[in-house]
Image (tube, rainbow, N blue to C red):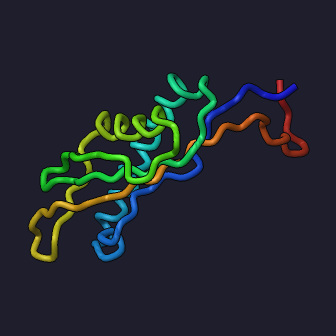
Amino acid sequence: MAAPVAPVLAQQKAENSTLNSADAGWRDAARRWSLRVASRAQQIYQLEVVRLGFEGRVEAMFRIGVDGTVRDCAVHRSSGAAELDALVCRAIAQSPPAPVNLDAGGQAQEVAVVLPVEFVMVDDLPPAEEGSETD
């Protein structure tokens, strides 16, 4: 018998040209923040969307302001399911402020970000490793 269907976020990270040139501290903070957003998206997916059987990759584009507020979230690339598309911007809106990006002079600057999130349904759990015990 197959295990219950379980949602898995296969990929989540913030990417844009600024991440490639920004200081390592901000990149790391932005990646940690994006993982929190993806975790929130997974919670919403489990509670509201997984029962519909939707899967797909959503790319949301938004701006991180000089104070860390996120605005102008929009679907950059659709998953094909409006429910999944809307879910990612909801998760972003429900997350704490994003890390502020500082330029070389220490001034906060606005940055545009694309956040890809992939939702995959898993029908079967992987087999247990040999020697492991289950109750």
Q: In this view, does 3 lie to the left or right of 51?
A: right
Residue positioned 24% across, 44% down in the render? 97
Q: In which quarter of the image is residue 124?
A: top right
Pinpoint residue 67: horizontal percent, then vertical percent.
13, 51
Pinpoint residue 38: horizontal percent, then vertical percent.
45, 43
Residue positioned 59% across, 49% down in the render? 10
Above or below: residue 18 compared with residue 115: below
Q: Is residue 114 left or right of residue 44?
A: left
Q: Which residue lies furthest to the front in this view?
A: 80
**Is residue 102 or residue 10 the one in the foreground?**
10
Residue positioned 44% across, 40% down in the render? 85
Q: In which quarter of the image is residue 128?
A: top right
* Quadrant that contains the C terminus: top right
Above or below: residue 41 compared with residue 112: above
Q: Is residue 15 left or right of residue 99?
A: right
Pinpoint residue 114: horizontal percent, then vertical percent.
37, 57
**Is residue 77 or residue 124 the one in the foreground?**
77
Q: Is residue 72 left or right of residue 30?
A: left
* Quadrant that contains the N terminus: top right
Q: How many numbered discs sit on the rendered protein?
A: 0
Residue positioned 31% across, 76% down in the render? 21
**Is residue 31 or residue 79 the one in the foreground?**
79
Above or below: residue 67 compared with residue 2: below
Q: Residue furthest right?
A: 130
